[in-house]
Image (cartoon, helix red, strand yellow):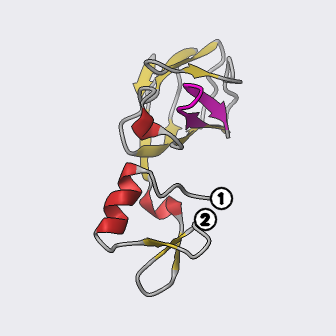
Amino acid sequence: MPYSASSPLLQELIAAGVVRMNNDNNGLLLPNGQALSMAALSGKAVVNNNAAAGYTVGDGINYVGFTGTQAASVAFTFPAGLAANDGVRITIFTQAAVGTAATWISAGATFVGAPATLAALSRTSFIYNHATLQWLPA
């Protein structure tokens, strides 16, 4: 999967000498030449939702795992549709079903192909595309 050197986080890490792009500009390397997975730079949150009706995915969080019970309807609020979020991938995993309605919210952006409900032990992922102001299925 190619990574964009224009990402603000990557620009900071490259400038600091923490990582560098490989020769093909489609991956990251540590200073010693070892390949680095973007997963190593991702944030995660594991939440015991206790049937709350909404959850906001914080900045820098790329994976949210919900344990415990879920409300029948849950509103998931993603980061705003900003250029700085271009290429951000967020995965939602839920242990229990969201059986009535899953609502997907992001200020200034829309969702394409977002599921209306979530089955127990399901996972759904989106990648933000700033050119279209959309969270697209990943």
Q: Are marks 2 and 1 in contact (CB under 8 Å)?
A: yes
Expressed as whole percent of the image width and height from the top left, the position of residue 31 reads 40, 82
Amino acid type of the residue that numbered disc 2 sits on in the rendered structure? Asn
Q: Nearer the viewer, residue 100 or 21?
A: 21
> Chief secondary structure of the magenta span?
strand
Mark 1 lies on a secondary structure that is: loop
List x then y, in percent, for residue 29.
Answer: 49, 76
Question: Pointer 1: what residue?
Answer: 1
Looking at the image, residue 11 sits to the left or right of residue 115; the answer is left
Question: Does 85 sit left or right of 16 as displayed?
Answer: right
- Please state which of residues 121 and 45 is positioned toward the viewer in this rendering: 45
**Distance from the alpha carbon under mark 2 to that under mark 1:** 7 Å
**Quadrant of the rendered structure where residue 128 is?**
top right
Res 87 quadrant in image = top right
Q: Is residue 16 above or below residue 82?
A: below
Q: Hey, what amino acid is under mark 1?
A: Met
**What stretch of residues is rendered in magenta?**
127-137
Which residue occupies 71% across, 24% down?
Answer: 113
Q: Is residue 54 magenta?
A: no
